[in-house]
Amino acid sequence: MTHWFHRNPLKATAPVSFNYYGVVTGPSASKICNDLRSSRARLLELFTDLSCNPEMMKNAADSYFSLLQGFINSLDESTQESKLRYIQNFKWTDTLQGQVPSAQQDAVFELISMGFNVALWYTKYASRLAGKENITEDEAKEVHRSLKIAAGIFKHLKESHLPKLITPAEKGRDLESPLIEAYVIQCQAEAQEVTIARAIELKHAPGLIAALAYETANFYQKADHTLSSLEPAYSAKWRKYLHLKMCFYTAYAYCYHGETLLASDKCGEAIRSLQEAEKLYAKAEALCKEYGETKGPGPTVKPSGHLFFRKLGNLVKNTLEKCQRENGFILNPNQKKK
């Protein structure tokens, strides 16, 4: 099981000193500010550290966010917000709109932005692991788990923290609700890719694999539709990825549906299903080329040369030939009678 996933770049941020001379008094308060500064710096370092694993990321994120809560929630656990919420200005870039930062003097903005990066890290970790050749069952489970964690973080930020922002996100910015929703759906789709690969390895019924592939294609179509209002200048490459994955997994669905029909001696219908898979695979191949030529955030690669893509092409070709042979065996006796 080798996968290829599109990834947008991490968000960048300006350093924060957490020095509040004249406001913070006493050694305990100073220690909290020092811990905030060091835990934030540590978390930012881990985002680009290839040796970082999920346990390290979780510990670093928990350490920073637990301290940041003092800038958001009142210490007496009342419904009122902390008096420190608006004391610090935070700057963050966006995954799609390059190096032009957004800034808000709001600790909730920092919580969402940093949480967004944590979720992105989990998707990138999953992508690195899934791209290995011959990954183990445990590694496949780790990929699936990481994508589910990322989807959960994105969903939690969207539902629980985004509504608390005083200044709403501008169109096309990371903290805009439809954009976060697209990340959630993409994570769900990619996690299901892992499930499909596992089902194929365990030789599950073709009907089940076809149903999973069709559902995955619908996830990608939904994610693509969610991004339809964004400017093509910065969303085109991402949308090409979602569109090609939609075609790819629809081809998978038709291919395995054809196998189901063949097992039921419906050779004519099986051939038509495989011919449809062939068309969709060719369309996905064309989109792979377009993806590689499209400018925008994300890696410059040729997906059509990737193992996961070539495997489906061979599967469609071989299954179609098998259907045509079976159909020939059925037709030959009739032809002789004529």
Image (spheres, grey):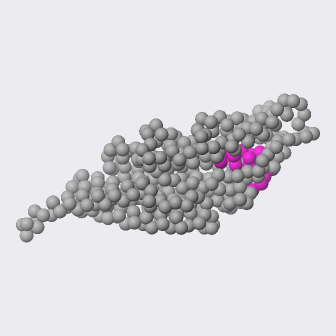
In which quadrant will I find the C terminus?
bottom left
The residue positioned 65% from the left and 56% from the top of the image is 95
The residue positioned 8% from the left and 66% from the top of the image is 336
Left or right relative to 332: residue 145: right
Q: Which of 166 and 31 is in front in this view?
A: 31
Above or below, comparing residue 80 to residue 279 in the picture: above
The residue positioned 45% from the left and 67% from the top of the image is 286
Q: Which of 129 and 204 is in front in this view?
A: 129
Q: Where is residue 105 in the image (x, y as percent from the top left)?
A: 81, 50
Left or right relative to 185: residue 311: left
Left or right relative to 213: residue 24: right
Q: Could one spot residue 72 in this view of the protein?
A: yes
Above or below, comparing residue 7 to residue 236 in the picture: above
Q: Is residue 116 magenta?
A: yes
Q: Which residue lies furthest to the bottom in this view?
A: 338
Q: Is residue 120 magenta?
A: no
Rendering quarter of residue 294: bottom right
The residue positioned 57% from the left and 58% from the top of the image is 299
Above or below, comparing residue 36 to residue 225 in the picture: above
Q: Position of residue 309 (x, y in %)?
A: 42, 57
Q: Could one spot residue 229 in this view of the protein?
A: no
Q: Which residue lies furthest to the left in this view?
A: 337
Q: Where is residue 314 in the image (x, y as percent from the top left)?
A: 34, 58
Count of all numbered marks drawn on residues in the image: 0
Q: Position of residue 42 (x, y in %)?
A: 71, 40
Question: Where are the magenta residues, as a range?
Answer: 102-118
Q: Main SS type for the magenta part? A: helix
